[in-house]
Amino acid sequence: MRLVRLGALVPVVAATLAPTTGVAAPLVIGADGILCNLTETIAADQVDVECIVKPGSDPHSLRLRPSERQQLAEADLVLINGYSLTPALDDINTKATVIRVGEIAVPNHPGNDPHLWHDPQQVIAMGGVVSSKLQGVTEGSASSAISKRQKKVSAVLKDLDGWIKAQIQTVPAAQRVLVTSHKSFAPMARRYGIKELPLLDEFTTGGTLRPSSLRSITAAIKASGTKTIFADSLPPSKTMRRISRNAGVPIASKPLFSEGTAPGRSLVQTATDNVCNFVDAQGGRCDTKAAEQLQARWAAIS
């Protein structure tokens, strides 16, 4: 739903208000990764935020629909993750300024890895960029409100960072290993002292599982000491099931969402879910009550 400004910004129901009585609020696209939820939280009702990559979808394989191309063409501001997270958004037709938020917030990220949001400190930096760019398309009290919400966002993310550190510490040191299919959690691994073992990226070419690859993967899994293999979707792929059987190590009963927010979950909910799934599976103990408090604080930002 688009919003209009009638002195102050208020939701508009087209059937009840004449379109000539107000000016449409700026249309901002929070395109991919966690940007939609981050932008919605910082912007609240000061702008009209639309998403392109839906929660649970793979940004790498996005194909733009005509309706999405139209949204992009009409937007006042387009926020994308950058680092080629979503190749379909690297060259778009729009009158708006296109901001590669991650590349500005975290320049020279190791390996140009686009999965910045798995480190809350990097999300804080991204939030600063989002806030600044939103204030560029708003004015007066709207701009001030955006700045205030961005500070609340940073406070929750700072506490999320501390919470994650505490949860990882409950995992025995030998079990602080994250065995996945692809290298999507490197920022989390670096931040919290976890060894990441992305099986298909390290031991296969193009994801093709040859007998020699399977032998190398099996040896690496056994050497890692992990209790669990983590899939990024359920049911897991045939390849991951074959790896699990060969190594004698089970696949976790819950997936880790690597490419953005989980369906129906905020970025904070997705982060705490991922951490608890990892911690519980690897012999630690997750503080779910504290996680729920962080989730509630995020939802209450206004």
Image (cartoon, grey):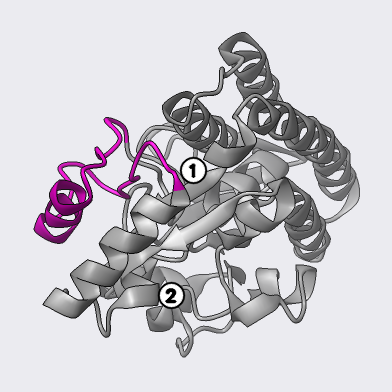
* 266 left or right of 181 in image: right
Residue 237 within the segment the image draws in magenta? yes
Q: Hey, which quadrant is residue 148 in on the image?
A: top right
Residue on which the image places disc 2: 86
x and y percentages locating residue 269 in the rendered image? 53, 30
* Label 2 crowd bin: few (<14), some (14–19), many (20+), radius 10 Å: many
> Does 62 appear above or below 156?
below
Q: What predominant SS class does the magenta segment belong to?
A: loop
Q: Residue at x 9, y 56 (%)?
A: 238
* 210 left or right of 268 in image: left
> Does 248 appear above or below 238?
above
* 72 left or right of 27 in image: left
Q: Secondary structure at mark 2?
A: loop
In the image, which disc is placed on residue 155? none
Q: Hey, which quadrant is residue 43 in on the image?
A: top right
The number of numbered discs placed on residues in the rendered structure image is 2
Q: Nearer the viewer, residue 278 or 105?
A: 278
Q: Secondary structure at mark 1?
A: loop
Label 2 and label 1: CA atoms lie apart by 38 Å
Q: Nearer the viewer, residue 185 or 218?
A: 218
Residue on which the image places disc 1: 18
Q: Residue at x 70, y 30 (%)?
A: 169
- The amino acid at mark 1 is Ala
Q: Residue at x 40, y 75 (%)?
A: 202
Question: Considering the image in quadrants, where does the N terminus appear?
Answer: top left
Residue 82 within the segment the image draws in magenta? no
Q: Nearer the viewer, residue 126 or 242?
A: 242
Question: Considering the image in quadrants, where does the C terminus appear?
Answer: top right
Instruction: Give the magenta range.
Output: 225-254
x and y percentages locating residue 280 in the rendered image? 47, 24
Upstream in sequence: badge 2 or badge 1: 1
- The amino acid at mark 2 is Thr
